[in-house]
Amino acid sequence: MSNWQIGPPQLIAISQCTKGLDFSPLAHWPQGLPAVAINKLIIAGFNQDLAFNHEVELNQTDTMVKIFRSLYSDLSLAEIARLCQRAQQIEKFATWFPLEPLISAFGLQPSAFFYQVIDAIQSLPIPMQNWCAEKKLGAQDFAPLLAAKGLDLSQLWQNVVSLSFSRSQAVLALELVVDLFLLGRTAKEIGLEKMAWRAEVDPWIESLKVHRFPETYRRDQQTEAKMKELPWPGTGQARWARQGDRAGIELKLFVSQPSDLKKYIQSLRQIQELLENETDMKTSH
């Protein structure tokens, strides 16, 4: 018996307990296993017929946290947002339920920013909340939502769920769409209609970048055209690529023997000289 168990739980009918904390966790509770309750508040296995009820003194918050934490190896931020919402709604238990210690037990800091993000997550449609839980989005991923009050993002949520966006696609799309709406663009202008195919997601996100950063896109296009004109070695493939706020040359080479590598290095030095000369000319002007 671990040191937090003050006594064996009592097996009782779940009808004697309160299920108001049901935050729809993604983890499946085994069908044949009774639910678990603390002071007749169900904390896991919300759809069972029987429950193991732990009677715990109301000031023993550490014990309550350890019981709860032992049942959930991990919870996403979206699941914790639902847990917070349910905990605040059950008035009878809100005075003693250890919500903030539980938040900390899952490695999160219950700060003002945290609660702003939690409020934003709670406003999302349930399918989108579930998607966020499955993808384990973090607090910073949701940050654009804090500036999105009053904006209609319902079509974006539908697209994310129905087309199974990746986490990175959804986070970037959210940031760009919110920025464009705040800049006065309409949903029609940025193509926020429901897309038909998964393959359309990346091209659409690229179009959002064009709308959001037109000058940067124009310069990148010009630079990419110049890169194609350079005498790249052999079958080398080079393109102008952007990673976050940085842009640069992405080069792909295939070397089958050491002599090829020597030729490639010589060619790359020539390209280096060309680029340096062009930079010097721009600087002199």
Image (cartoon, grey):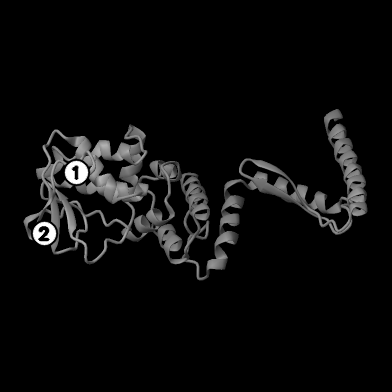
Quarter of the rendering occupied by the N terminus? top left
| Front position in the image: 82 or 68 | 68
Q: Position of residue 52 (x, y in %)?
A: 14, 54
Residue occupying the far top of the picture: 284
Kindly identify which residue carries mark 2.
14
Kindly identify which residue carries mark 1.
88
Quadrant in which residue 129 is drawn: bottom left
Check disc 1 and give the amino acid type: Gln
- Left/right of residue 89 with respect to residue 265 in the rendered view: left
Q: Nearer the viewer, mark 2 or mark 1?
A: 2
Check disc 2 and give the amino acid type: Ile
- Left/right of residue 265 with respect to residue 248 in the rendered view: right
SS for tag 2? helix
Q: Position of residue 34 (x, y in %)?
A: 18, 60
Q: Which label's residue is closer to the chain start, 2 or 1?
A: 2
Q: Position of residue 22 (x, y in %)?
A: 21, 55
What's the residue at 71%, 47% (across, down)?
220
- Left/right of residue 219 with respect to residue 10 in the rendered view: right
Q: Is residue 209 above or below residue 33?
A: above
What's the residue at 89%, 46% (across, down)?
265
Counting other residues with Cα less than 10 Å from the Cα at mark 1, is it few (<14), some (14-19), or many (20 or more)? some
Quadrant in which residue 157 is drawn: bottom left
Evaluate whether residue 127 shows in this view.
yes
Evaluate whether residue 153 shows in this view.
no
Quadrant in which residue 114 is drawn: top left
Quarter of the rendering occupied by the C terminus? top right
